[in-house]
Image (cartoon, rainbow, N blue to C red):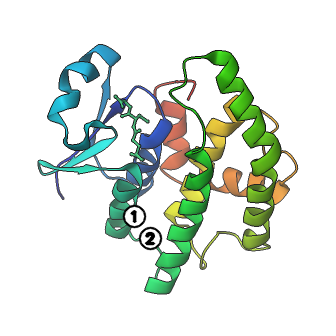
Amino acid sequence: MPNYKLTYFNLRGRAEIARYIFAFSGIKYEDNRLQRADWLTIKSTIPFEKIPILEVDGIILHQSLAIGRFLAKETGLAGKTHLEQAQVDAIVDSIDDFISLFPWGEEDEDAKRAIQNNLFSNLAPGLLRNLEKYLGENEWFVGNSVTWADFYWDVSSSTLIVLKPDFAQNYPKLLALKDRVQALPGISEWIKERPETVM
Ligand SMILES: N[C@@H](CCC(=O)N[C@@H](CS)C(=O)NCC(=O)O)C(=O)O
């Protein structure tokens, strides 16, 4: 088993997808959570100067979804065939397109709230409707077993629910999928034991 070190802030954010995969798969890793001051001193030493990064036996991977996809492939959570993998990736990307529109770094609180409100009012319903339709009566988004797309829905929607508690309230199938993910072995324990952070 390689030596894994995941570096991010003390947040769920863009590292939580990797942490879910580690938790579900029972893989040990170092969960390195940086204070902002420490980050500023090491930022310039990191390729592409953004976190999360995952060190795999000392090789640095960046981009949370590249990290997630790599870990999913290593652990059988990426989809069973190339076709399923493309379906899984497309769900992850559809969710990420929306998440990436949020002004996470905006310091003007009024401007931030206005952009968020616009996204929740105008774009969220379409995404949620499409995700719920895609899931249909199935247990998981793709194929007949859980994949990291299901994990990504849970971690992403949990952050969005912090910003807007009723974000997914009209989508019972998507809420039930969150419950199924959160009840999975490894993940349910992780949710209880992880550091408590707002995001
Ligand atoms: N698309 C990248 C985004 C990486 C990113 O923007 N990371 C932020 C934290 S979520 C960061 O490093 N911020 C600190 C900085 O830019 O100095 C990913 O998914 O990993």
Ligand 1: does it lie within 8 Å of the C-beta at label 2?
Answer: no
Where is the C terminus found, in terms of image quarters?
A: top right
- Residue 8 position (above or below residue 41): below
Q: Amino acid at mark 1?
A: Ala
- Separation of marks 1 and 2 at Cα, in angstroms: 5 Å
Label 2: which residue?
Answer: 78
Q: Amino acid at mark 2?
A: Ala
Name the residue nearer the viewer: 63 or 152.
Answer: 63
What is the x, y in percent for residue 45? 15, 33
- Quadrant for the N terminus, please: bottom left
Q: Is residue 81 visible?
A: no
Image side of residue 197 versus residue 181, left or right: left
Q: Are marks 1 and 2 in contact (CB under 8 Å)?
A: yes
Residue at 71 percent of width and 25 percent of height:
113
| Residue bearing mark 1 | 72
Q: Height in image: 177 above or below 40? A: below
Could you say whether the residue bearing mark 1 is in a helix, strand or loop?
A: helix
Which tag, 1 or 2, sits closer to the chain's start?
A: 1
- Of residue 107 and residue 181, the one placed in the foreground of this image is 107
Q: Residue 20 at x, y = what percent? A: 46, 49
Q: Give the x, y percent position of residue 104.
A: 54, 31
